Image (cartoon, rainbow, N blue to C red):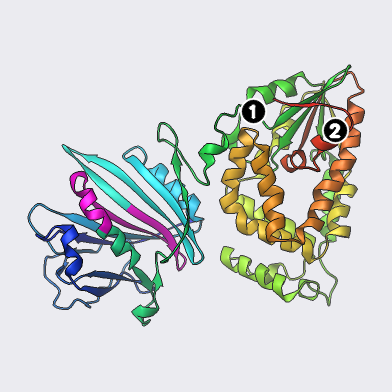
Amino acid sequence: MRRSITFILVLLLFSCSTHVSDRSSNQPFSSRLFFDHEMGVSFSLEKNWDLYTRSNIAGSKYEEQFSINQTNTFKTLLLGENENKRASVHLFSEEIDMSLEQYFKLLFNSKKDKIEPVNARLFRTDKGNYVRWSFKVPVNNFTLRYLEYVFPANGRTFRLGFWTISALYDDYVKLFDEIAATTCIFTPGSDPSDCKLLLTAGEAESEIIEYATDKRELYFNNEAKICKGRDKTYMWRVSSPTNNVYLFGSIHFAKPEMYPLDTRIEKAFGDSGVLVLELDSSSEEFKEKVKEMFASAQYPEGESLRDHISDGVYKRLEEYLNKVGIPVSGFINLKPWAVTLILETIQYQSLGFSPEYGMEQYFLNKLDDEKGIVELETFDEQMDIFIKYLNNETYLSYALFNIGSSEKNLSKLFKAWSCGNTKVINELFFDKTISFDPDASVVLEKMFYERNRKMSKKIISFLKDERDYFIMIGAGHLTGEKSILTYLKEAGYTAEQL
């Protein structure tokens, strides 16, 4: 959730008469500056850069401290000046609750009509992540060139930015990077030597953030390459002598902008006489079963979640709930399966995804009286998986891992889904999960592999009918070595991806 509080510190640097590349002989000094009561910033700057306030009164001490006592207030400082050569550094801080990837996309979308993006790269380090990006802004008869570092720290998102005219950018960019590399964030009363470096020194894993051809959209995690040269949907057609069965990998939580779906998907639904769902959530029986299920979600008096999971998993749960601002007391009496389902729902909805726009609901709304509905499973079969087999910390641990990585993976997942890239989806659903959490194999066996074997047998029975079937099933069931497609192939059927 975005909060309205914005703290902004603007520092203007005007270049001295010496060329930038000749300044290496100057000794650096550290300038400690507060910009509100909770946070501070420390820059390492060169000795011959004099410090000025906005009123052009030079500071008598390089360690002079400036305070801003109100939020949403600009504070401008000047550091050196010389005729027409000028550059600037500014720091924006915003209290905002979202991932770095989400924030940067929001930032880019707010600027894209006014700028010409040049390049961007996401850096991942063991102490934090940041984005370094550059863009141009036309101003009257000249162009400004910007370099910004975007990073989260201490519950805020920061943008440390530099600008100069384009003709001088190459002269200044090295200096800009040096300032960024020595910038620290600290709290009042702390020792500047203990402050958190914004940009971690040493090697860092990096990813190019790619722009669409028209530079109107950007892609993280090499998203642009995911669909390069692909023109497929996440749907397959399996044919028999009597009918066609369409297997559509659906997404249970979605956004309104994902509709309408590809015309190939819409046509397959229109041509089919039967809609097949894992469960029919529109039925009265389903609604009653849900009530019964959650009525059994609490422990009896005298028992709590704390008694049934390990200290390690409980600590991870506490850390996540603290991060999203939810008291753990609201979960202490719930069983692990109930906690897990609630956490997953909260996570998806916090990222803008809703079951209201899920694809099952989308097609249920389009259903007419001529189409029948068939369920692949029963409610009791699905709930037995959670309540009988996964009602322990294994499923909760699996969910906490996925929740922790979902923010950075969801964009990649939906991009892969949009062009039917099963390889990427298999990596996200299975390969990465198992590599980070070996115990996840137990969860995957119950949630996917065992169900795939059972549902495949039912799908084979549909292929003996004369009506065409449109089958909606979670996308994870249609990828990997133990997918429904694999079992159909073993039974002698060919699935054609459309």
Mark 1 burial class by Cα count in 10 Å: few <14, some 14-19, many 20+:
some
Q: Is residue 307 left or right of residue 407?
A: right
Viewer-nearest residue: 314 or 444: 444
Which amino acid type is shown beneath numbered disc 1?
Lys
Viewer-nearest residue: 339 or 72: 339
Image x and y of residue 185, in percent: 37, 70
Residue at far left of view: 83
Circle 1: element type: loop
What residue is shown at x 69% (from left), y 55% (from top)?
A: 433
Image x and y of residue 11, in percent: 23, 62
Q: CA distance from mark 2 to mark 1?
A: 20 Å
Mark 2 burial class by Cα count in 10 Å: few <14, some 14-19, many 20+:
some
Q: Mark 2 = which residue?
A: 488
On screen, residue 357 above or below 393: above
Image x and y of residue 115, in percent: 31, 40
Image x and y of residue 39, in percent: 37, 72
On screen, residue 363 above or below 20: above
Per the rendering, the mark at residue 439 is: none
Q: Quadrant of the C terminus?
A: top right
What residue is shown at x 71% (from left), y 37% (from top)?
A: 250
Circle 2: element type: helix
Looking at the image, tell me whether mark 2 or mark 1 is earlier in sequence order. Answer: 1
Which amino acid type is shown beneath numbered disc 2?
Leu
On screen, residue 347 above or below 364: below
- Residue 429 visible somewhere in the drawing: yes
Quarter occupied by residue 274: top right
Q: Mark 1 = which residue?
A: 232
User: Is 170 inside the magenta-drawn segment?
Assistant: yes
- Residue 39 visible somewhere in the drawing: no
Q: Over which residues does the magenta segment extend?
A: 148-174
What residue is shown at x 83% (from left), y 52% (from top)?
A: 445
What residue is shown at x 62% (from left), y 66% (from top)?
A: 321
